[in-house]
Amino acid sequence: MSDLEAELRKAVRGDVGFDVTSRALVTMDASNYRRVPAGVVAPRDADDVAAVLEVCRAHGVPVVPRGGGTSIAGQATGTGVVLDFTRYMNRLVGLDAGARTAVVQPGLVLDRLQEAAAPHGLRFGPDPSTHSRCTLGGMIGNNSCGSHSVAWGTTADSVRELDVVTARGERLRLGRGWAGAPDGLRALVEGELARLRTGFPELPRRISGYALDALLPEKGADVARSFCGSEGTLGVLTEAVVGLVEAPRARALAVLGYADEAAAAEAAAGLLPWGPLTVEGMAADLVRSAAGLPRGGAWLFVETGGDSAGEARARAETIVRAADAVDARVVTDGTGQRALWRIREDASGTATRMPDGTEAWPGWEDCAVPPARLGVYLRDFRALLTAHGLRGTPYGHFGDGCIHVRIDFDLLTEAGVGRFRRFSEELADLVVAHGGSLSGEHGDGQARAELLPRMYGDEMVALFGRAKAVWDPDDLLNPGMLVRPAPLDSGLRFAVLPREPVDVAFGYPGDGGDFTAAVRRCVGVAKCRTTTASGPAVMCPSYRATGEERHSTRGRARLLHEMLAGEVVTDGWRSEEVREALDLCLSCKGCRSDCPVEVDMATYKAEFLHHHYAGRRRPAAHYSMGRLPVWLRWASRTRTASLVNALAGVRPLAWVARRVGGIAPERGIPRLARETFSGWWRGRGPQGGSGDLVVLWPDTFTEHLSPSVGRAAVRVLEAAGLRVALPPTLRMRGRPVGDGRSRSAAALLTARRGRVCCGLTYVSTGQLDHARAVLRRTLDLMEPVLETDAPVVVLEPSCAAALRSDLPELLHDDPRAARLAARVLTFAETLERHAPGWRPPRLDRPAVGQTHCHQHAVLGDTADRRLREAAGLDGELSGGCCGLAGNFGFETGHFEVSAACAEEQLLPSVRAADPSAVVLADGFSCRTQLEQLADVRGWHLAEVLAEGLTDGRTDGHGADGGPPDLAL
């Protein structure tokens, strides 16, 4: 391929990537299939596209256009050159509000078009659940639809004109009246008019095959429309003129509850005469929490529009009265509607796991039947699943007769793959028997193209082949799709993975202890590729900062998949390509909660670093910051904190320290506290109290860097009537005697002194052997606590998350780990559960800041929200990640990305805040980032409440009537 690469580099102005990473990132889309490309080209314009086609034609190398890579049938993968339009050809060229049209490039993400059209009261009609990352080119290639298709149709209904480059370099402008038709296409169609008039089923979601019937004279001989859904096999799209529709000024959402999905499906068609905007269906199996949903085992999401909120609600209530539902709820506020729609949109990822955790896969993701037949079809579909011993939960576009379903196929064994084929063949026959289409939205790709003769017959499929030959006589474009397809059970992406479990450090309890299964979690729906973090979401800050696929959760998962496969990435755990991609992972754990399939890239990164550096010298930052607890305890024991601070203030010495420690030169070195939190605790003397006993965890940051947080927490917890203790510092040898609490004198004499530690810094740098040793010592120290009912209060969110998640997963063979993890509570959770009658001081101040990413992902912030509300701290904290993320933002080479993450949400929200607002930041990293990048002091919630107690105020004002200064 070296000659091909060299010629492409000469011919195009865009990026040419034949390296390991570029190829590994596009071996898969969101389907079951995998094809290894020769290389990837990101063209800058149509001239680049034409040049790529010319070079590849000369070399006989296929070309595959690719958008967001979310295709579910395999059509966005290829063995030749993949064209990535998302990097450069991603612009909105123009928008004509009067004509209600937009001119777009193929790599434009749908949400960017929607954002541009919204100020004009317009929108693009089709909206797949992947709207935040799918591209217009991909939507045109698949003829995508989305939830609003009952109102606004498919993408083909919104296409006006298309600019296309054919495989032989001809540039065409496709439109109605045979505009842009390649030579021979009109003659082909006019010779087959009878077949085209009778050979296509009439239903709203017929996506399978080529739309040659759009070329009939009575349909306007629309070449652009016929091109939609061709999956990149006819020509390469370079620009499109699309139509926009008027967006309703107000919307209401009626959620209708039914006994099961068949009952919901039977009811869906009866709602269409009322003119709804959506009629979406899903069953309870796909809902993580039914909170906010009406009673039922399945639901229809029926959206209505109007010129006013009252009109939209009235239409929704009319539908509720007309529907024979078990229960119903009408929601008109935007926040409530978005929360409910997220439940539906996340189904594409949630469906990849059965309720018992079993994997489920696409392949029969979007069959469609006439809407009136959907109920009976679903019953037959369920019976077919049962007959094959398979499970799956349908959901999707019930109003259009189109369902999505992931099925628990066994695609890892020969027997399982054989059953996959037999089921596919029988289901195709069932769909055809109901007058349906094998694909109702996502295209045929490799998953269904082989079965098209069952739907259309051999003669119509032969006609498809003749049409392909008119457009692409050399079969250069996406071969193996639609025409002369590859077998549906070949090229499965799981076939290359190791069959035996990989030796790993973490337990991966959700994946049966199998790291390969953990990596398989990523199915490619690409929610991590969103360019803006909405609401409280965190995932994936590094991708939003760089815009590079390798820095997305999906991209990293793909590289790990290829590492395990060993074909493209050949160095295994020593792979530099994987290390470089993981280097900018902040270990924020946002993917653990925001990814629909709960990919935990922070854990995968720690696992990789553990193996990558085994027996090798590590980066300096792993020694300086990865072993931070050791250095800080050393400074405390030698009473040299003041000296360290003084030396850090001398510029040449600080420069040397940063250089030696692998710390970014842009970073200041945090100052050590003169007195540790534990030192303050020992000096305060015994305290009374009659409430519950709570054990306050002296994490490394609270202990050595911000003891004011610990002091404030003690003040508040005791004010709430709780008895506060610190963890033991003596580690006993031997078993307890007598009553189970006493120890022998010999045990006391031989006890070893130590400090508890969550192991966070060791885990984040992949020093897992050290982490395990530290955590086992911690469990030894905590044994007396585990013999009580006392909760463990952890003030630093990242440490609490490490104890709740990393501890039991890393020490999965030690039952004490799970017991300690179950005891961990946040500061707010402790007050809510163990001092339910206590009321915090009323501060009545606006609050800004950011929910810690680990708290969002692992711990949850419901209790914190309630505590802030009770204290009169008003305002929503932003989402995203502060960007410092423990050691990440301090490491050399990370400052630019770290600062970009902070500028996404945190810093703008602080700058725009009211001057009287208190800046809340429970994490030491978040406070440090605020201080170093914005010169703003952030406060832990415990500090804010303690200040209120100190002033003795209940009205939120200090002694002088002004706002409290929070000078603890």
Image (cartoon, grey):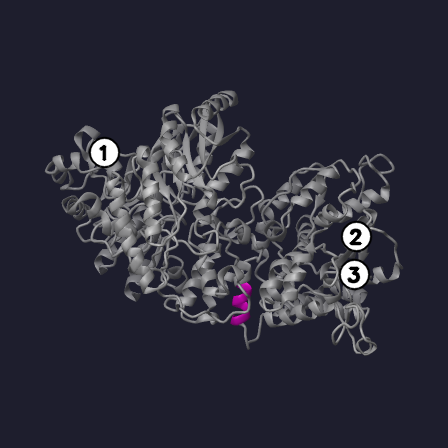
- Callout 3 secondary element: loop
Stretch in magenta: 605-612
The answer to the question of whether label 1 and label 3 lie on touching residues, with beta carbons closer than 8 A, is no
State the residue position of label 3.
Answer: 726
Residue extending farthest right: 685
Q: How many marks?
A: 3
Q: From the image, which quarter does the N terminus lie in?
A: bottom left
| Majority secondary structure in the magenta region | helix
The image's mark for residue 692 is: 2
Position in image of residue 685 (x %, y %): 89, 59
Of residue 386 and residue 445, the one placed in the foreground of this image is: 386
State the residue position of label 1.
Answer: 222
The kind of residue tagged 1 is Asp
Residue drawn at x 42%, y 42% is: 109
- Callout 1 secondary element: loop
Q: Which numbered mark, 2 or 3, is in the foreground of this view?
A: 2
- Callout 2 secondary element: loop
Of residue 517 and residue 890, the one placed in the foreground of this image is: 517
The kind of residue tagged 2 is Asp
